[in-house]
Image (cartoon, rainbow, N blue to C red):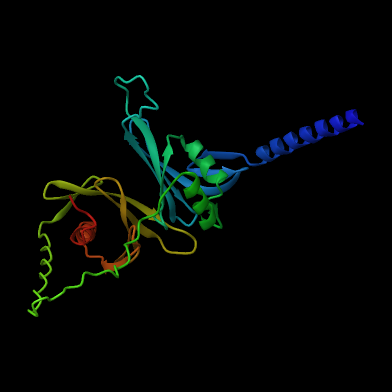
Amino acid sequence: MKKILLKRLFFFVISLLFFQFSFAQKAKVTYDDDTIKVNGVPYASMKKKSAGFLMNDYSICNFSGTELIFIKSLTREPSRRTNPYGGVQAMEEYHEIHFISSGGKAELEHRTGKGFAKLIVDNNLIKDNAIDPEAERRFMQVYHGQYPSEPPPPSSNAPVVVNINNAPAAPADPPPPPLPKSKLPVTINGNEIVRDNNVIGKFRQDTTSSSYSEKQILIIVYSEAGDKVAEASAPIASPKEWSIKTFPEGKNFNIMYDSPGEREKMFRYLADKNYLIY
């Protein structure tokens, strides 16, 4: 009887291992021609852009051209854990993954493009051509990510003025006047946004198109530190307005597409709204 039980246990373990191996074989993730594929079926678009020597950023889009995730390559001083003996050590590379719609951000160790493709598929982040909110929430928990902090609610414990001598209370100080808008122009130098000889931000320009909508100019605007602050789009055929979405608060603006210098004027609008500062 004991031998029979051992045999059954042995075959159960072998069957379980075979099942796991077969499942792993079914989910084959590849990354080539700027496309993530699962078992040969296109899953999402992932474009690579050089961010320095042996460093790359990645932009993950759905097949309508909408950016879903941006992965930014960064460097930092190595920690004591990676350099326990002290001394001089090269800067270590790491990545930040930014979820465009929610503004969520998490920090990841350095990976290759194929590694990021497998990470996205293994966590089921994209479903029906969009980010799956439940999968994103789980990913943020696992990788200790964070969402943009919301402003604190108004305090209900406002100070009470006690007038002991029945004298009128002193008037509150008037609020400071708003800062005047700068009259300095905004210029472009390569992909840098410049004002008063200072780099106040950077931008990336793409063209999006699909069978469902007209071609669009898409400009992603970053702060000088590299944080994504805005996204502006306009139709290529007859542009009249820029449609601007700012991050992380998700505000939407429409401003005139004013040629010539339409990009510079749009960047100046963002600078005057204090989205681009130095």
The residue at the point 43 percent across, 44 percent down is 47
Residue 43 image position (x, y, % from top left): 55, 49
Question: Is residue 57 among the parts visible in the rendering?
Answer: no
Residue 143 image position (x, y, % from top left): 47, 44
Q: Quadrant of residue 110?
A: top left
The residue at the point 16 percent across, 74 percent down is 162
Residue 197 relative to residue 49: left or right = left
Front in this rendered view, residue 60 or 110 = 110
Residue 243 image position (x, y, % from top left): 32, 65
In what quadrant of the picture does the N terminus appear?
top right
Q: Is residue 265 above or below residue 224?
A: below
Residue 254 image position (x, y, % from top left): 29, 68
Front in this rendered view, residue 123 or 116 = 123
Question: Is residue 105 among the parts visible in the rendering?
Answer: yes
Q: Is residue 257 above or below residue 68?
A: below
Q: Is residue 257 above or below residue 30?
A: below
